[in-house]
Amino acid sequence: MTIVRWCLLHAVVLGLVSLPSAGQQGHAADATGPAAAHRDYPFKPVPFTAVHLNDVFWAPRIETNRSVTIPFAFKQCEITGRVANFVHAAEALRGQLGEKDAKLPGYPFDDTDIYKIIEGASYTLSVYPDPKLDEYIDGLVAKIAAAQEPDGYIYTARTINSEHPHAWSGAHRWENEEILSHELYDLGHLYEAAVAHYQATGKRTLLDIALKSANLLCNTFGPGKRAIWPGHQIVEMGLVKLYRVTGDDRYLKVAKFMLDVRGGPNGSQYNQSQEPVVDQTEAVGHAVRATYMYSGMADVAAMTGDARYVHAIDAIWENVVQKKLYVTGGIGATGAGEAFGANYELPNLTAYNETCASVGNDFWNQRLFLLHGDAKYIDVMERTLYNGLVSGVSLDGKSFFYQNPLESNGRQGRSPWFGVACCPGNITRFMASAPGYMYALGNNALYVNLFGGSTADIAMDGRSVRVVQDTRYPWDGNVKITVDPGQPATFAIKIRIPGWARGEVTPSDLYRFERPEHTQARLSVNGSPVPIRLDKGYATVDRQWKNGDVIDLNLPMPVRRVLANDNVAADRGRIAIERGPIVYAAEWPDNPGHKVRDLMLPDSNKLTASFEPALLNGVEVVKGRAVALSYDANGKVLHKEQEFTAIPYYAWANRGNGEMVVWIPERESAARPAPWPTLAMMSSVAASKGGNRVSGEGIRHYPQAVNDGEEPKSSDDPSSYFDWWPEKGKTEWLEYTFPRAATVSGVQVYWFDDTGRGEVRVPASWRVLYKDGEEWKPVQNQQPYGVDRDRYNKVGFTPVTTAALRLEITMQPGWSAGVNEWKVDK
Ligand SMILES: [Zn+2]
């Protein structure tokens, strides 16, 4: 770095030199600032502003994102006080904040929701001018500016009440950052939003706020200054974006510093600080933090050439695709710490698969592609995109999943918003920039990574090449690509032949097709067949292109059965259904009796696909015949053949809550026959008031879990339970109303208890009441009311004839209570 360059860079930062406006050039994702001369990724994405989708799949959803989700999410930020937090922080700075407005944010990361939606909205402004939206964002930016402290610090959870900040924030700046405060997490999202806003509008308003804040980081952290690592990563990616747009390498250095300080005695797997980042080889801990960190490492490696980062994220990627990736592309198996599970730990009903983790997984895989130019990363990215990511938002764009499990007993539904609202904002920014994942440039070649009806005007070696895709992808594998280079020009077009079209489910042995059918992809140029010679997953056509040249790609899309590696216990004896890039699910509305968890799909049963234009905004469905299994009164398994329908996984839970399953048993040994209905199972269940709520992550408290006949494996078995959390130390009740009055003489209760993970414990005491007329009376119990873990607590009582039975449960002081299963003895 020469003195001259330093001066120039500081002039840029101080605003003395005007930055080129990428927005005006329409190159939002390009390195158009002074950093363009620096080292960068060897492959460059074609910016989303250059790619206009008009396809059957993404274009309508991107439009829903723009016209419905973004305004809806901004509204939610207003309703929930997220906007007011900035106003109140500004009032506090001016000493004008009244006592009653000094309320702190619910969570210290609530600020990020506004930043993320501004980022998403800015992307839409890049391609769809909207003066009203532009003006609305200007208003938000003014509120954010007013909430920034004089030295650049911005964090409403402290500024609103610096004497008594949020409980997670710590008494002083940064002291809780490695654990709870999320100060740097907020800033990472601010920086990403600022760059998007600047590139979309050419306005420096939000960028200047971000740079002032980033300069504070440069002055605070680094060699010889403070050394902390971000508790929730993302500031690394954000700082690299600031570096790319300004060329000021102090931002890059701070990003790298914050990666390199991870590790040491205070480190933990939870946020990937258990060891130095360059020594990490396994994906562990919180999945969103992990993928944001791996993405930041890719960015810093691309800008600095540090190969140790690349070796680490390559090794971690191998671990994920070999052992920790769901067939839907989701990651983060467990709700305990929102984390990766152990190798091959991929449960279906309790799969966590946070929507944000899917977004992070695609950020990361895109960056690995940009480093290596290998289609295997796009294979993983496409799997996540069409399945475990886009499942995160409903078809109408107004409700969301926080978790994306691969099986449901009806407990989970979509929510319009969450207490922790990270996922909706991430959807808004991802969907708005999705066309930026289609093409890339490098090695004098144009890379066609994704398929979809679209027109792209791609800047390539000083000329603009128009590339038009005509296709019904993902429902049809015929893709016609028309190339218009203007003047004839010689370059290579590299067309990705997806893994699934080459007989490979994932670039690993984690999944495989049951039958390696002959699904030979075919390619022709202007009607003449071209042999496909694969290089890193691409077929290359290197020739002189002239206007109107046509590439025809044919990717056969039979319905296929997928098997998991035998080490994945949850999927043994089961198959998943795929067609093209789409993973299928059987859902309750399409199948007899609204049940799918008791189905079996023998491998001799043929499956066919057909398009249903009126269903779920138009989807290809898979049909065939299945066998429904059930127990009779003597424990014998009965078989009943019936119609079977599966829909694309991403479209589930758009018609209400109920059963859903992705991995379907192929053999009776893996099946889950419907239990013989007992008196308890035929009863209707009700719970006291505290039990009727939806958690911050959109999980319904589900009293029906206690009489679903599902046998718990242990008291902490999370697959099917009911609890009153966060109610603690109270007396609550559960009630069975029998189909008709019955004589009963006992109950068996299996207590839920998540010691080590949550705040539910066996109760302090309990008793059974029966309904006598309109009155509840205690039964005469013949044994004590037991509170043992990991078994049924059986209590006999003097027989009563009654229409309803009630469990009255008194929790331990300071703890909640819950029930896995409740049986009634006649
Ligand atoms: Zn999230």
Image (spheres, rainbow, N blue to C red):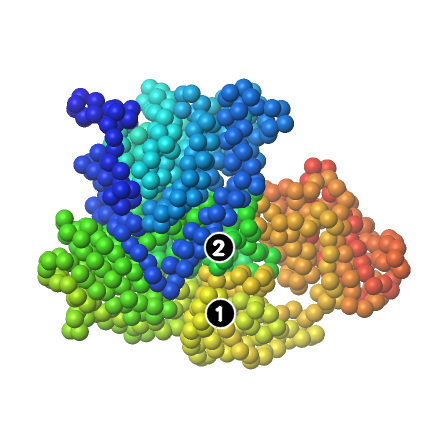
Q: Which residue is painted at 42% across and 71% down in the image?
A: 620
For label 1, the SS is loop
Dot 2 amino acid type: Gly
Reply above or below: 80 against 743: above
Quadrant of the image containing the C terminus: bottom right
Binning the other alpha carbons within 10 Å of mark 1 as few (below 14), some (14 to 19) or many (20 upward) gives few
Q: Nearer the viewer, residue 715 or 726?
A: 726
Q: Mark 2: is the Cβ under 8 angstroms from ligand 1?
A: no
Residue occupying image coordinates x 48% and y 71%: 614
CA distance separating discs 2 and 1: 16 Å
Residue 632 horizontal/vertical position (percent): 67, 75
User: Horizontally, is 751 left or right of 313 in the view?
Assistant: right
Residue indicated by mark 2: 397
Q: Please, what is the three-letter code of the amino acid marked with disc 1? A: Leu
Q: Is residue 430 visible?
A: yes
Q: Tell whether label 1 touches label 2 (CB within 8 Å).
A: no
Is 499 left or right of 147, judged from the image as shown?
Answer: left
Q: Position of residue 440 (x, y in %)?
A: 24, 52
